[in-house]
Image (spheres, helix red, strand yellow):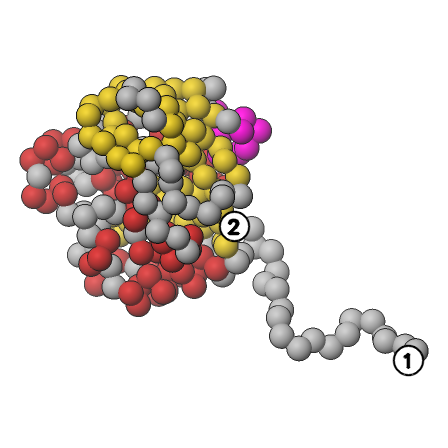
């Protein structure tokens, strides 16, 4: 059983009728309901909760944290960012969605500015699978279309991904590395691009399948923690 916590800043839905019409119960609940299936235990957390809903107890019970943020990046407490960062390095998986590319946690893990081109023009996005053997691509067609989405375009200021799984093309001509994986310490990070708050992207079954696959892939491997520092020899060292 993979224990997933879906985190959302939960700001747009409170003061935008346009966003509330699409996600009346919040983006976090739409994602949680959409990915809920056998093999997952899903709960949600939001920024307005104590410790942003990411207490030690919650993270102790989280295998994979799914992160959606946009307007409130600077409102996330640095102590909570440090807490999540330490958990990722220790093996917790992290799935960062859409505008979470500018979140404090993603930027801290990437070590770069994570900036990009963007445009809101109700344009078509075609998402291509470029690594069909990767588990994140399981059950996904060779390509699928989102009829209306926000454009993100290259250059995306991130380190070269350890694995590139998905690439997007937009009606206006741009392309974007939209499904990227990274290994950090014992943890795994998956960045997935789609999900602007005014579009019903998180009801799309292909999008939800990618998030499910990403959560399964990012789940802890439970490998033994490496031991570092001065170390006694495992074998006898014979004097030369």
Name of the residue lying farthest toward the right? 240
Please name whichever residue, 113 or 39, is drawn nearer the observer in this view of the structure.
113
37 over 240 or under it: above or below: above
Residue 178 image point, x, y percent: 39, 34
Tally the numbered discs: 2
Res 166 → quadrant:
top left
Q: Is residue 135 magenta?
A: yes
In percent of width and height, residue 235 lies at 83, 71
Between 141 and 149, the one lying in front of the other is 149
In terms of image quadrants, where is residue 224? bottom right
Q: Residue at x 12, y 36 (%)?
A: 20
Residue 156 position (above or below residue 126): below
Q: Main secondary structure of the magenta part?
A: loop
Is residue 98 found inside the magenta-colored segment of the image? no
Q: Of residues 173 and 147, which is closer to you in this image?
A: 173
Q: Secondary structure at mark 1?
A: loop
Q: Is residue 223 left or right of residue 203?
A: right
The residue located at (21%, 50%) in the rendering is: 9
Report which residue position mark 1 lands on: 239
Give neighbour class at mark 1: few <14, some 14-19, many 20+ (Cα, 10 Å).
few
Q: Is residue 100 visible?
A: yes
144 to the left or right of 49: right
Which disc number belongs to residue 213? Answer: none
Residue in the image at 62% along x and 70% along y: 228
Magenta residues span: 131-139
The residue that appears at 59% across and 63% down in the rendered structure is 225
Mark 2 — residue? 183
Q: Is residue 121 above or below residue 105?
A: above
Task: Give me the C-alpha separation between circle 1 and circle 2.
Answer: 39 Å
């Amino acid at each position: 059983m993979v224990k997933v916590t879906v985190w959302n800043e939960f700001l747009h839905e409170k003061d935008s009728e346009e966003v509330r019409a699409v996600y009346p119960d919040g983006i976090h609940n739409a994602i949680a309901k959409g990915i809920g299936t056998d093999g997952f235990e899903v709960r949600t957390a939001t920024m307005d909760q104590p410790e942003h809903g990411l207490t030690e107890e919650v993270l102790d019970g989280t295998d994979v944290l799914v992160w959606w943020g946009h307007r409130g990046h600077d409102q996330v407490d640095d102590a909570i960012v440090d807490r999540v960062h330490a958990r990722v390095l220790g093996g917790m998986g992290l799935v960062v969605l859409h505008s979470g590319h500018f979140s404090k946690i993603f930027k801290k893990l990437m070590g770069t500015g994570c900036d990009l081109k963007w445009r809101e023009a109700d344009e078509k996005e075609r998402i291509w699978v470029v690594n069909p053997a990767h588990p994140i691509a399981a059950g996904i067609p060779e390509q699928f279309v989102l009829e209306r989405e926000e454009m993100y375009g290259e250059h995306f200021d991130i380190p070269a991904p350890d694995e590139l799984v998905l690439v997007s093309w937009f009606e206006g001509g741009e392309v974007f590395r939209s499904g990227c994986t990274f290994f950090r310490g014992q943890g795994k990070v998956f960045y997935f691009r789609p999900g602007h708050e005014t579009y019903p992207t998180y009801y799309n079954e292909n999008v939800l399948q990618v998030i499910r696959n990403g959560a399964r892939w990012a789940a802890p491997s439970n490998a033994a923690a490496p031991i570092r520092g001065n170390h006694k020899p495992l074998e006898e060292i014979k004097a030369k």
